[in-house]
Every structure is written in structure tokens, then in C-alpha cells.
Image: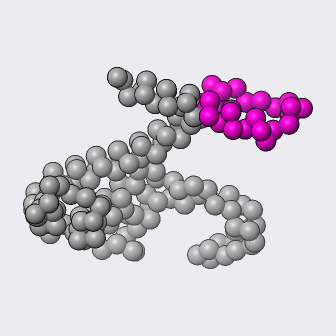
Amino acid sequence: MNPYNILLQYSWLLIDNFKYSIQFYIPKSFSCIVPCTVVVVTWQDMFAAGTDTTATAMEWAMAELVTHPRAMRRAQDEVRAAAAGSTGVNEDHVAQLDYLKAVVKETLRLHAPVPLLVPREPPADAEILGYHVPARTRVLVNAWAIGRDLATWERAEELPYP
């Protein structure tokens, strides 16, 4: 079965359960009803956003490992050593995978799946790096620029693989 069809069926199942459970809490006089298709499309957008960023990060990590063969070998050796004697890698092995965690963190630093983070609003007037930011001003954090800041990172444009 097509993964999109599975997602669509699951979405409608959630909507049916939502409609059944919500009927006990919303009074009959409530006039603002959201069409089920709007809820389904919104839920699918949220699901896709969560999976798309993960897939993007994994693709970049694999691309970086392919271009750094010594780093790939070291990560492979670490995974094989952690999973030795078992049928596969599971959640218990993750604590032993320090190098692989470092690879993932460096990949996310250099190739942030979302370059601008969720907007923030300070509740009171603030001063950030010498700039006055009035209360309730929407601030966008540029994760891409932070990950490539030459003042913070020694080799900002490259991954520090051995």
C-alpha cells in the first residue's frame, strides 16, 4: 500500500476519534466548526514537517560520511563494537556511540535542516549583544549563521573529522 494512503487513512481515523470524543465537551450552540479536511491537511503538514527535517539531516550526515571515509570507518567500527554479540543495534547501544553522536551534532551544526529557528518574543525589554530589543518584538534566530560563526568555531566551514 502507498505510504501516502496509509497516512491519509490514519488521519481520517484520528479525525473520527476526535469528533467522537469532542462531542461530549462542546456545547450544541457552538457555531465555529472546522471542516475535517482542514484538520486532516494540518495534521499531515505537521507530520511531514517532522519527518522531512529528520530525513534532511540524515541525508546530510550520510553525504558527509561518504566524503570523509576515515570518519565513516571510525563510526562503523564504533557501531559494530557497541552491537557486538547482539542481533542488531538497539536503544541500549546508543549510550556507547559517542563518536556517532558527535558526527550527528556536527552535521546539524553545519547543515541545519531549518536555518531560522522558531521566532521568539522577549516578555520584557532586553539587551542582546549591545542591541536594545523592546518587549514583545519578534526575534528570528539564524541557526545557519551561528553554526558558521568564525568567532565561535575554529574551522567553521568544515567538519572536524579526523
State the count of labels: 0
Q: Residue furthest right?
A: 29
Rendered-image quadrant of the N terminus: top left
Q: Quadrant of residue 107 in the image?
A: bottom left
Q: Is residue 157 visible?
A: no
Q: Position of residue 94 (x, y in %)?
A: 27, 65
Residue drawn where x is 46% and y is 38% of the image:
48
Q: Is residue 32 magenta?
A: yes
Residue drawn where x is 49% and y is 40% of the image:
47
Q: Quadrant of residue 111 in the image?
A: bottom left
Q: Is residue 108 visible?
A: yes
Q: Quadrant of residue 112 in the image?
A: bottom left
Residue drawn where x is 38% and y is 48% of the image:
54
Q: Position of residue 67 (x, y in %)?
A: 15, 53
Judge from the rendering whether residue 7 lies leftward or rightward of residue 124; answer left or right. left
Segment tinted magenta in the rendering:
15-41
Q: Is residue 74 magenta?
A: no
When the figure is inspected, residue 155 is found, relative to residue 104, above or below; the finding is below
Rendered-image quadrant of the C terminus: bottom left
Q: Position of residue 116 (x, y in %)?
A: 51, 54
Residue drawn where x is 42% and y is 43% of the image:
51
When the figure is inspected, residue 126 is found, relative to residue 85, above or below; the finding is below
Judge from the rendering whether residue 6 lies leftward or rightward of residue 123; answer left or right. left
Judge from the rendering whether residue 144 lies leftward or rightward of residue 34; answer left or right. left
Give the color scheme: rainbow, by chain, secondary structure or one colour. Answer: one colour
* Residue closest to the eye, 122 or 14: 14
Judge from the rendering whether residue 101 lies leftward or rightward of residue 125; answer left or right. left
* Residue closest to the eye, 153 or 103: 103
